[in-house]
Amino acid sequence: MANMFNVGRDCQVVLLWNGTRINMPIVTGFQSQQQTHQVNSTPLNSPPIFTDIENGWRGQFDVDRSSADLDSLIAAKEAAFWNAGTIGQGTIYQYINEKDGSTTTWEYAGCTVRLSDAGRWQSENKTSQRLEFNASTRTKIS
């Protein structure tokens, strides 16, 4: 029987920073969550009223370290800030192979990133890193 739902292998992610692709050959996990600002009103004479105002996206990449690319990105980002006050932004593309054979592409724009876990170095073990992000918007490209 064919698989009826998506699994992790159906997803690929690409990070572009200032127009340059950041090499992450061993992405082991990707997660994103919508952010909203919740607004509530409690009228005296009627039921409560609720709404959510769009407030971007956040998420994370889990990567098995195979190069200095993520470390170099963060070092360049730090240097740009301390040397010139520059705060760069990136774009993330998420490609999902759907079960019907189509591909859905999501673009996370206006991204900031931080290396929340630069890795634990241990004898005879892989070194994993975690890159967290915030994005202004998520747009369906295809």
Image (tube, helix red, strand yellow):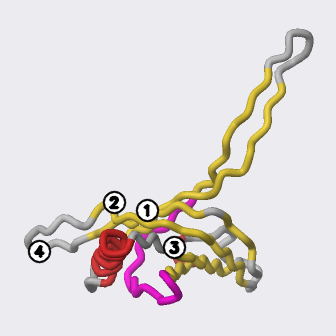
Residue 11 within the segment the image draws in magenta? no
Mark 2 → mark 4, Cα distance in angstroms: 23 Å
Span of residues in magenta: 17-32
The kind of residue tagged 2 is: Ser
99 or 141: nearer the eye? 141
Q: What is the secondary structure assignment of the residue under circle 1? A: strand
CB-based contact (under 8 Å), mark 1 and mark 4: no
Question: Compared with residue 36, is residue 26 higher up or lower down, i.e. above or below?
Answer: below
Q: Mark 1 points at which residue?
A: 132
Q: What is the crowding at mark 2: few (fewer than 14 residues within 10 Å), some, or many (at least 20)?
A: few
Q: What is the secondary structure assignment of the residue under circle 2? A: strand
In x, y percent, where is residue 134?
53, 60
Q: Is the magenta stretch mostly helix, strand or loop?
A: strand
In x, y percent, where is residue 50?
79, 31
Regarding residue 1, the answer to whether it shows in the image is no
Q: Name the residue under label 4.
A: 124
Mark 3 → mark 1, Cα distance in angstroms: 13 Å
The kind of residue tagged 1 is: Glu
In x, y percent, where is residue 17?
48, 81
Q: In which quarter of the image is the N terminus?
A: bottom right
The part of the image, by quadrant, that contains residue 125 is bottom left
The kind of residue tagged 3 is: Gln
Residue at 11% x, 68% y: name it.
122
The part of the image, by quadrant, that contains residue 131 is bottom left
Q: Mark 2 points at which residue?
A: 116
CB-based contact (under 8 Å), mark 3 and mark 2: no
In the drawing, what numbered circle is on residue 89?
Answer: 3
Which tag is nearer the camera, tag 3 or tag 2? 3
In x, y percent, where is residue 49?
83, 27
Q: In this view, does 112 lie to the left or right of 76?
A: right
